[in-house]
Amino acid sequence: MLDIKFIRENAEKIKEAVKNKRINLDLEKLLDLDSKRRDLMTELESLQATKNAASKEIPSLNSEEKKVKLLEMKEVDSKSSEVKARLLEVEPEFKQLMYLVPNIPSPETPIGPDEASNVPWRYWSESLGDLDAKDVDKTAQAPTKFSFPVKDHIELGLSLDLLDLEAGVKTAGFRGYYLKNEAVLMHYGLLWHALKKMQEKGFGLMVPPVLGREFAYYGSGHFPFGKSEQYQVMTEESMKNGITEPTYLAGTSEPSLLAYFSDKTLEEKDLPIKVCGISPCFRGEVGSYGKDTKGIYRIHEFMKVEQVVLCKADIMESDKWLEAMREIAQEMLKDLKLPHRVLNICTGDMGAGKYKMYDVETWMPARNAYGETHSDSNLTDWQSRRLNIKYKTAEGKSKYVYTLNNTVVASPRIMIAIWENFQQADGSILVPEILRPYVGKDLISPKK
C-alpha cells in the first residue's frame, strides 16, 4: 500500500506502474473516492468543532438560550450521523482500491508484459564459476554434460523408489505425491542445512503459524491478488458456533513472519531485523493445469525456508539487503554444486508490491532449461504500511520500515535439479557432498 498523498501527487507515475504491472485498477475512481472521503471527513471535523464550541458556550447561557442551542446541537448530531453513514459507504471501496495500488518499480527493473521480458543477469556453474550474462556462451547455457540419455526426475524417482505419484494422486488428488526412502532424508537434510546456514548468517529462526487470518495476507500483499488460489479453512464446529472469520493455509511463511511485527514501533538501533521461517506451504494454483503438471515441479504442498528482513526506510540500505539475500540463495546452490542463473524480473512478472525482484533459476537437464527455485524481492514500505510496522529514528521521527523476502530453499522442487544433474549412467544418483551426512550414503542406487 502506498501513501494516498503520494498517490495524489504522483498519479501519472502510478498510472504507468498500473499499466506496466498489468494491474486491474481504476485509478480515477480511487482518486474520486479519495476526494469524496476527504470532503466528508472535513465536514465531520467542522461539525465536531461546532459541537465542541457549543459545549463550552452552553454553561454560560440562560435557560431559553440553552434550549435553542440544544436543539441546534440535535440537528448537528443528526447531520453528523448522516455524514458518518456516507463515509461508511465510501470507506470499504476506497480501502479495496488502495490494496490494488502497485509499488513503483525500480529504475533497473525491465519493462515488459510477462516472463519473456525477464533479463538474465548472472550465471554460475562449478566448472565456469561466476559469469556475467554477456559472457555466457552456448556451453554455459547447458552446463551439465552427459554421455548417456538423460532421465527426468520422474523416471529417476520411480526407478529408485524415491517417489510415488500414483499413490499421491489417489490420496491427495491432483498433484499429490509421496516422497520415499532416501528422498525423505534428502528433503529434511536440505531444510536442516538451510536453517543452520541462516542461523550462522545471524537470522532469528522461527516456526511460524501455517494458519493465518485475513489481515496477515492483505498485509503481505498476497490478498486480494492471490485470494482465489489460497486454501481456506473453516471447521464444521466453528460454523456451528457462529465463528465466521476464515483462516487460510500459508503459501509461504512470509505473511506470518511479517504479521509478527504488525502494529509495532521498533527502534532504529534494532534494525535491521532478520528472521527466517520454516513451514509447510500450500498453493492452489488454479488455472495452471496446462503447465508443469507432471512430477514435483508445480505442486500444492511443499516445505520452504524463507528469509525476511526489516530495515531502515532507505533505498540504498534495502538494495544492499536484496543483494545479500540473493547471495545467500546462491550460496545454498553453490553448496549443492548446482548450476544456476539470476534473472532481473520485469514489471509484468513481478507482482504489485515489488520495487525490485530477482529470481534464481537452477538448471534442470531433462527440461533442457533453467527452472525457478528462489525468489528475492524488495518491497520498500508497501507491506509495512498495510501492517503498520514502524520504527522511531534517532531524532524521534516515526517511519515505516522497508521489507524484503527471499527463498532460502524450497523442497521437493530443488530435488528435481539435484536428481537430474547428479544422475549416473547406471540410473543411480550421486548425493551432493553437503547432503551425505543426512542421506547416509554417497550414492542412491537402484534397489535390488
Image (cartoon, rainbow, N blue to C red):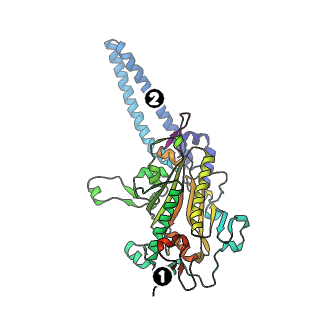
In front of the other: 300 or 280: 280
Q: Is residue 260 left or right of residue 144?
A: left
Q: Which residue is mark 1?
A: 160
Magenta span has 392? Answer: yes
| Element at label 1 | loop
Q: Residue at x 38, y 76 (%)?
A: 170
Q: Which residue is mark 2?
A: 45
Q: Residue at x 36, y 18 (%)?
A: 69
**Alpha-carbon span between mark 2 and mark 1:** 72 Å
Q: Residues within 10 Å of mark 1 (few under 14, many from 20)?
A: many
How many marks the image carries: the answer is 2
Above or below 181: residue 386: above
Whether 58 is drawn above or below 446: the answer is above
Q: Nearer the viewer, residue 384 or 64?
A: 384
Where is residue 129 drawn, in percent x and y? Answer: 67, 67
Task: Identify the residue at the far bottom of this view.
Answer: 448
Which part of the image, by quadrant, shows the C terminus? bottom left
Magenta stretch encompasses residue 92: no
Which x, y percent locates residue 192?
47, 64
Q: Amino acid at mark 1?
A: Leu
Mark 2 surroundings within 10 Å by alpha-carbon count, few (fewer than 14), some (14 through 19), many (20 or more): few
From which residue to which does the magenta span run?
389-403
Q: Is residue 21 visible?
A: no
With respect to residue 73, does 171 lie above or below? below
